[in-house]
Image (cartoon, grey):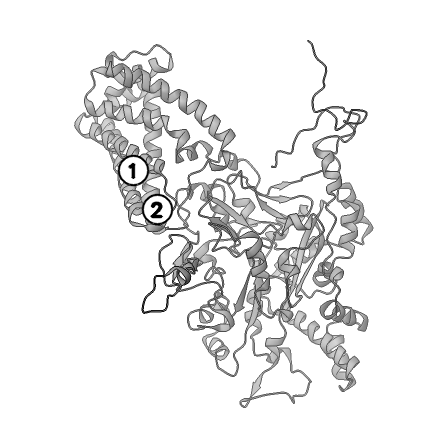
Amino acid sequence: MTNQFFFIGLPYAALFIVITGTIFRYLNFGFKVSSLSSQFLESRELFYGSRPFHWGLLVLFFGHLTAFLFPRSVVLWNNVPVRLLILEIAGLGFGLTALFGLIILIIRRIKNKRLWMVTNKMDILVYIILAVQIISGLWVAIFYRWGSSWFALSLTPYLKSIFLLSPDISSVSAMPMAVKMHLISAFTLIGIIPSTRFMHFLVYPFAYLWRSYQLVIWNWDYRKIRSSRKMKNGIKSKNN
Amino acid sequence: MNVRSQISMVFHLDKCIGCHTCSIACKNIWTDRKGAEYMWWNNVETKPGTGYPGKWEDQDIYKGGWEKKGNTIRLKGAGKFRGLKNLFHNSGMPVLEDYYEPWTYQYENLFEAKEGDDQPVARPVSLITGQAITPKSGPNWDDDLGGSQDYARKDVNFKNLSPAEQEAMFQLERMTMHYLPRMCNHCLNAACVAACPSGAIYKRGEDGIVLINQKKCRAWRLCVTACPYKKSFYNWNTGKSEKCLLCYPRLENGQIPVCMQSCVGRIRYLGVLLYDADKIKEVASCKEHELVDKQMSIYLDPNDEEVIKAARKNGVADSTIEAAQKSPVYKFVKEWGLALPLHPEFRTLPNLFYVPPLLPTMAFVENGTYETTSESFWGAIEKSRLPMKYLASLFSAGNEKTIEIVLKKLMAVRLHRRQETVGDLPQNEVSDPMREVNMGKETADAIFRLTSLPLFDERFVIPPAHREEAMEMLESTADVKGNHGFGFKEPPKRGL
């Protein structure tokens, strides 16, 4: 029953919340969709915390995504022991990098009075979830070794079954506690995205890559003023 | 030719008395809010000095503006690759200490303190944490060369001066200073616009005002790094960047920005310049010593038939063209060539121009006394006590020739007016300087008039915003014709 709650109920709840919640938040509280940057109040320690934390997590996220999308290729890659070692050590390395960054970030936030002014309750939850997530991941990497290989056989089918709407928890129920913790905190993390600063990665500015540097907006274009012969309602300016 | 209109400004530095009324007016209406306490969209600095935020001109520290690379330019501390790479930690961004920690005083303590042996005091408390602090720096901490060891001596513009020249500037008899009021330049090649990953910062097509859309801003903070003038500020409370908006709600109603309205010395002029938007990139990428001349060439003559035709074709309103023809800025910048951009080497093509200060350069010392009986009435520009190199570093990317010509023109006007009003100078002492800068009597009188006796409407020529037509972009005003009362947003017809 517990397994069903955590591995069927929780992931679907998380998915439902993240989809409806982010859309709701973006449309209704779009002004607040960002990670409230505190670099202005404290910059030096942020450098040693934020950079390793973000780069570590970014690589790990895409690593997990690859293992989920192309399990066969990952297993094939791991056929040669040296390549398996490289992959595992790299994963562990980036995990430790992210943990190092997170610890610096937490210490920074606790010891700096200015940062208390821009910290809310959900930020504390974010730190806790992230700590559980990274530590449980490292735990699995160290004590239940070669996860990059057994992941493909046990967890990928489970995650796939979730997305195919026919959840099969037989393999995940037999997993050790650390793996379960990692999964549960991951689902929780996804579920709290709409109500926390996690929102900021959803608005990563990709559009910047292909827009021109200078941006000029005309509020009203004398050449484009509608003629009154087209009898339909105008569209409100998107500029505001 | 892609003609656009730009609201631009001229500050006449000889007239600035450093009273900070502009800054206070701006603070009162725009930045007297939580998170914005430390911001001064408009501030007045004493030069030489390090300014606000400290050493803002040193782009090795703050990585602002554009840098030339080959035949083109790129953002120094931002841009598509560097900017997105730096999102996690924006290395060039100034922090609170570079500005100052805003504070207030516990005034209520004066009234509510319990009875005791001591007089109650109002202690300073931080406006960020609410804790008691001892202010160590604040707005205009270095006013009038106060604490010059820490501030004036560290002025970034001294880098081209030899140690002996620097030392000379700080001898008591030779010491000189002037004020430098600063605000957003509403640049043509704005670095903040280019650096914003969210696309929240934009230039208004109608009048060239650069604005930050607060809804689209996502606190990536790259504009703060990218603006070489450090006039984009991060609001730590809202998590949005803010900057001078040239009081656009006032401008649209035909009023002038408050900093200009309140200016005691009447140093500020505002008007329209027409420019060729196709040439922005070319001008911004030119060689450093050509920057000022090239920037001047981008502004077009509003009386030229060709320009008027192209402007109309581009949708510039006739009233705007008319305002451009009367623009005091056009006169100072193009016609008379008296006003120069601040730090053109940042390559943003700023639209705030300064008439460089003549007064601090004039009096010079010989044998320990002020020299007033030299061969000419006011002494030669070359012998001035404020080194030309210093002014050139501020206003012409190091090109001393440009500064010298402007100062000589200003001097010629003074000599001409002395001759007109007092008439005690030998004829050649007036006519030679005027011939040297190629200035006629009418021009000199016109410069004198617009400098010393201008009317309000001559200092500020605001193009009408045509708000009465703006409605037509949102809905056709003919839609409701023939309907009852206010008309309907939806057709009232029922049934399928």
Read off the chain for label 1: A
- Residue in the picture at 34% in, 24% down: A66
Question: Crowdedness of circle 2 by 10 Å Cα count: few (<14), some, many (20+)?
Answer: few
Label 1, secondary structure: give it.
helix
Q: Which residue is mark 1?
A: A98
Front residue (pair B154, B483): B483
In the image, residue B406 above or below residue A204? below
**1 or 2: tag closer to the N-terminus:** 1
Tell me the quarter of the picture where residue B21 sits. bottom right
Q: Residue B317: where, in percent of width, then height?
A: 77, 44
Read off the chain for label 2: A
Q: Which mark is residue A155?
A: none
Q: Residue B231: where, in percent of width, then height?
A: 53, 54
In the image, residue A211 above or below residue A10? below
Circle 1: residue type: Ala
Whether residue A80 is visible here, answered yes or no, is no
Q: Which residue is mark 2?
A: A116
- Residue in the picture at 64% in, 87% down: B372
Question: Crowdedness of circle 1 by 10 Å Cα count: few (<14), some, many (20+)?
Answer: many
Q: Residue B354: where, in percent of width, then height?
A: 63, 64
In this rendering, the label closer to the viewer, 1 or 2:
2
List the single residue furthest toward the front: B115
| Quarter of the image with the N terminus of chain B in it | top right
Mark 1 near mark 2, Cβ–Cβ under 8 Å?
Answer: no
- Residue in the picture at 29% in, 32% down: A129
Front residue (pair B139, B166): B139
